[in-house]
Image (cartoon, helix red, strand yellow):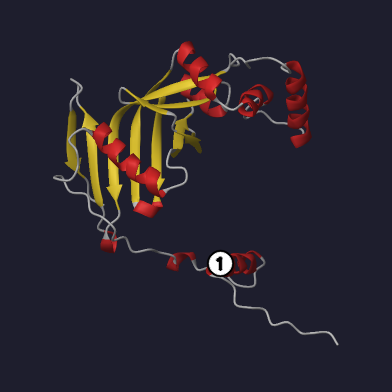
Amino acid sequence: MAKHLTRPPLPAAESMKSQMSEASSGARAIELAKMRLSYSRESLTESQANPDPIVQFQEWFQQAAAALTEPNAMTLATVSPAGQPSARVVLLKGLEEGDFIFYTNYESRKGRELDENPRAALVFHWPELERQVRVEGSVRRVSSGQSDAYFASRPRGSRLSAWASEQSAPVTGREELEDRLSRLERRFEGAEAVPRPPYWGGYALRPESIEFWQGREDRLHDRLVYLRAAGGAWIRSRLAP
């Protein structure tokens, strides 16, 4: 005789997945207007914050690195000459002399927009710490030597993929990308090093403003912004949430 099994209660994570599945099928709608959290972990006062925003960022980043899987993930926002904004998540790969360093394909959409309009904004979102950091400033390419050094540190597969991908260009399907990668693996088989493509390298964002946001109860958040003055000094002020 067949046994009738009773399904055990779903764990919290699986329960949420089930609710999302039901919502996508129309069985149950998620009430977005009711989704909210109360922030109460920390505060950010003028006496707590370092007068140097780069030092303050480093302190917060160290705390984020201890709590998050990928604390260097950041949203990079660029704007075309026509004023059309675009944003995507990239990885911070260096903080050098106060500049925020990241790498990409120069011929990608973000690369083209940065060359045409060399200004950008970054956002770090660390929800486990109820924090955000916003950075705005001018952007320039880093030196070829710096790009070469970073490219050489990447895993071999990532270096080959940089050659295989004409980033942001349409492709017929994933098979096209995999075919390109296979040809490149044969091309560089036995080679000690995979050179950096000439269309791939780094950018440095020189911050002109850095804002630190700390979630607080009742949405009365803490916001401290640092603006770079003409002489290079930083001027700090508090913003209303």
**Residue 93 point in image, percent of width and height:** 44, 29
Q: Is residue 130 left or right of residue 1?
A: left
Tell me the element at label 1.
helix
Q: Nearer the viewer, residue 145 or 86?
A: 145
Q: Nearer the viewer, residue 64 or 162?
A: 64
Q: Is residue 9 left or right of residue 80?
A: right
Which residue is at 83% across, 84% downward?
2
Which residue is at 47% across, 34% downward?
91
Q: Nearer the viewer, residue 183 or 208?
A: 183
**Residue 134 point in image, percent of width and height:** 34, 39
**Residue 51: quarter of image:** top left
**Residue 131 point in image, percent of width and height:** 33, 49
As drawn, which residue projects farthest toward the right? 1
Q: Is residue 113 left or right of residue 8?
A: left
Q: Amino acid at mark 1?
A: Met
**Residue 220 point in image, percent of width and height:** 25, 58
Q: Which residue is mark 1?
A: 16
Judge whether residue 173 can be spotted in this image: no
Judge whether residue 5 can be spotted in this image: yes
Which residue is at 75% across, 31% downward?
178
**Residue 27: quarter of image:** bottom right
Local packing at callout 1 (Cα closer than 10 Å; few below 14, some 14-19, many 20+) is: few
Which residue is at 17% across, 40% downward?
237
| Above/below status of 78 relative to 203 | below
**Residue 216: quarter of image:** bottom left
